[in-house]
Amino acid sequence: MSKWVEFIEKESKPKTKVYSVQSKCDSCELGEIKWHPAWRHYCFFPTIEFQTVHSDRCLQEISKFITGLNESHKEIKRANKFAKDIEDGKPFQ
């Protein structure tokens, strides 16, 4: 749990999710974390409505959350591939 920011799920897509990153002190949205297809990773997209300022600790919390999402996404893809291989009768590797 982060001390400075809150991560709120905004949207659930078939394979990915979108999260709002909000300041805990005033609940304003600092940006979104969503899947970036070109990089095949979750990334932080700062809001363009107003200028935001982030400390190193705030950015570390956002980075930690994104790392967890990316690791979970990879694990789900591996599990789905494994299940499909079993279904298709492919040998274990």
Image (cartoon, rainbow, N blue to C red):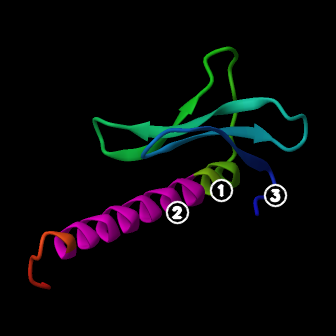
Q: Which residue is labeled 1 in the image?
A: 61
Q: Which residue extends farthest bottom?
A: 92
Measured Cα–Cα span from mark 2 to mark 3: 17 Å
Q: Secondary structure beneath disc 1?
A: helix
Residue 77 image-quadrant placement: bottom left
Give how far apart the Cα atoms at labels 2 and 1 are. Answer: 11 Å
Q: Residue at x 69, y 27 (%)?
A: 52
Q: Furthest-top residue in view?
A: 49
Outermost right residue: 25
Main SS class of the magenta portion in the image? helix
| Quadrant including the C terminus | bottom left
Identify the residue at image location x=76%, y=59%.
2
In front: mark 2 or mark 1?
Answer: 2
Magenta-drawn stretch contains 77: yes
| Residues shaded magenta | 63-86
> What SS does tag 2 mark?
helix
Image quarter of residue 33: top right
- The residue sitting at 46% across, 45% down in the picture is 16
**Vertical arrangement, residue 89 with respect to residue 56, above or below:** below
Callout 3–callout 1 Cβ contact below 8 Å: yes
Give amino acid for label 3: Lys
Residue type at tag 2: Gly
Q: Which mark is residue 3?
A: 3
The reply, left or right, for residue 84 in relation to residue 54 is: left
Residue 54 pos. (x, y %): 68, 40
> Which mark is first along the chain, 1 or 3?
3
Q: Which residue is mark 2?
A: 68
Q: Quadrant of residue 40?
A: top left
Q: Which badge, 2 or 1, is on the more N-terminal residue?
A: 1
Residue at (76% x, 63% y) in the render: 1
**Residue 10 screen position, x and y as percent:** 66, 36
